[in-house]
Image (cartoon, rainbow, N blue to C red):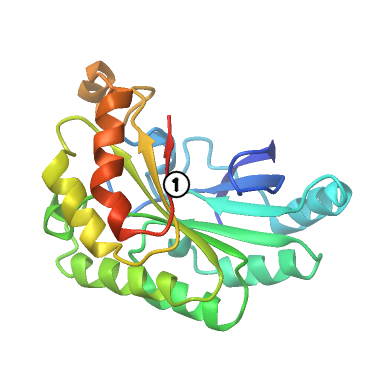
Amino acid sequence: MKVAGLLKTSLIDYPDKIVSIIFTQGCNFRCPYCHNPALLPAESVEGEYLTLPVLLDFLQKRKGLIDGLSITGGEPTLQPDLKDWIIAVKELGLLVKLDSNGSKPEIISDLIEQQLLDYLALDLKLPLNLYWLLTDHTDIATKIKKSINLVKESGIEYEFRTTVVPGLHGQAEMMEIGKLLNGAKRFYLQNFKPNNTYQPAYLSKVPFTVAELEQFKNIIKPMVNEIKIRY
């Protein structure tokens, strides 16, 4: 697996848990507001990656200090040996959280069925009819919808989340996202921050105000069990 980065400790990535985070290289989306653009290409600039033995040794030494490992990207489900790494981490007795854009429902389904995930975070970028702005995969809407249903029915802890960006998200878009999430357990609105974006033009965009975020929250609130804003 191409692991291009490691964060030793996070108190905010996995609700109520302390975790380490690994960042996989490569993504099949090109979100213009992405704050980790270095992780989008298939290969890192340095061309060096963290190996599984090194990660396991690190995690073994951190046992008692952390509850688990969060795997994010890039897009982790593009990694052919993702499952093998998760199995190895689980054998240490640690929790595993996976972040995904939902483009590989077959991978998500297998990991759920094999009971290899303890928490799943799925990023819902836009209403399904607008995903063409992010990727050229023609069947992406079908895949995203399938992943949403898989997560809802998984029986594990999960969250859906949307980073809201001026120019891409408004009240109409939030209504459509709410309809997709209808009945979901947990949803987070994440305010866009103009830091290190994939498309430089987004560095000049002004994030939504608290009042605007509350408007979005009120639109989606009737359709999900729990909704929170991450400022």
Q: Is residue 132 above or below residue 39?
A: below
Q: Which one is nearer the viewer's eye here, 186 or 143?
A: 186
Quarter of the rendering containing residue 198: top left
What residue sits right under mark 1 in the picture?
A: 43
Q: Is residue 99 above or below residue 198?
A: below
The amino acid beneath tag 1 is Glu
Quarter of the rendering containing residue 152: bottom left
Q: Is residue 186 above or below residue 73?
A: below
| Left or right of residue 88, residue 111 in this image | left
Determine the residue positioned at 15% across, 41% down.
Answer: 171
Please provide percent x and percent y for residue 125.
28, 49
Can residue 14 be seen here? The reply is yes
Can residue 32 be seen here? The reply is no
Q: Is residue 97 above or below residue 125?
A: below
| Left or right of residue 163, residue 92 in this image | right
Determine the residue positioned at 15% across, 47% down.
Answer: 173
Determine the residue positioned at 33% across, 64% down.
Answer: 103
Quarter of the rendering containing residue 197: top left
Q: Which one is nearer the viewer's eye here, 99 or 152?
A: 152
Please provide percent x and percent y for residue 84.
64, 71
Q: Secondary structure at mark 1?
A: loop
Please provide percent x and percent y for residue 92.
81, 65
Q: Where, quadrant-wise, is the C terminus in this rendering? A: top left
Determine the residue positioned at 88% across, 50% down.
Answer: 64
Q: Where, quadrant-wise, is the N terminus in this rendering? A: bottom right
Please provide percent x and percent y for residue 93.
80, 66
